[in-house]
Amino acid sequence: MSGTAIHRLVERCRTGDHPGCVARLAAGWVVFGERQVFPGYCLLLPDPVVPHLNALTHTDRSRFLAAMAQVGDALLAVTGATRINYAMFGNQEPALHAHLFPRRDDEPEATRAWQPWAFDWTAVPAYSETLHGELRRRLAATLHGGASLA
């Protein structure tokens, strides 16, 4: 399992080398998605990395799922989203990670019901501090009750 993109992302978060890193939670790391298919799209990465949800102990599994909901609550608060879509697959990257997609009522009606992978991800902006840094900082502050990552 070593060497997945998830392992590399977690290592970058640990060393402070991931510009899209939002916060360190007890269950792992919150990072902005490389492509912002929806503004605020995040991933929750466990630390340490495990192959899948069922590889966690009951306590760690509960902690991870609670953290996922905590991030969803924070995304609702800072993005004005109507709901959060949650996804965990691990088929391409065989390591546990959760995708969190803020969805809004003002999305175009023609695509409002689409699942995120139906969109052209090459046509959406990549994460950048210029475009998304303020949202990242607000999300970090919300997750930490006012304390933000630099």
Image (cartoon, grey):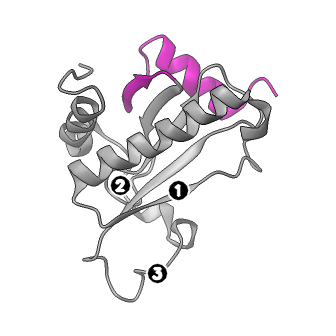
The residue to which callout 2 is attached is 125
In this picture, residue 22 sits left or right of residue 61: left
Of the two numbered discs 3 and 1 on the same chain, state the one appearing first in sequence: 1
Residue 39, picture quadrant: bottom left
The residue to which callout 1 is attached is 86
Q: Nearer the viewer, residue 122 or 35?
A: 35
Inspect the image, locate mark 3, and give the three-letter code of the amino acid beneath it. Ala
As displayed, is residue 10 above or below residue 40? Answer: above
Which residue lies at the image location 43% right of the left edge and 57% below the top edge? 101
Of the two numbered discs 2 and 3 on the same chain, state the one appearing first in sequence: 3
Q: Report the mark closest to the observer, 3 or 1.
A: 1
Q: Which percent across, then down, holds residue 67?
A: 48, 36
Q: Which percent across, then down, holds residue 72?
A: 39, 49
Identify the secondary structure beneath mark 3. Answer: loop
Residue segment shown in magenta: 1-26
Q: Nearer the viewer, residue 101 or 142?
A: 142
Real-space Cα distance between discs 2 and 1? 21 Å
Of the two numbered discs 2 and 1 on the same chain, state the one appearing first in sequence: 1
Q: Quadrant of the N terminus?
A: top right
Which residue lies at the image location 49% right of the left edge and 62% below the top edge? 121
Inspect the image, locate mark 1, and give the three-letter code of the amino acid beneath it. Tyr
Q: Are marks 2 and 3 in contact (CB under 8 Å)?
A: no
Residue 112, picture quadrant: bottom left
Q: Are marks 3 and 1 in contact (CB under 8 Å)?
A: no
Q: Are marks 2 and 1 in contact (CB under 8 Å)?
A: no
The residue to which callout 3 is attached is 113
Q: Is 11 inside the magenta-drawn segment?
A: yes
Q: Quadrant of the C terminus?
A: top left
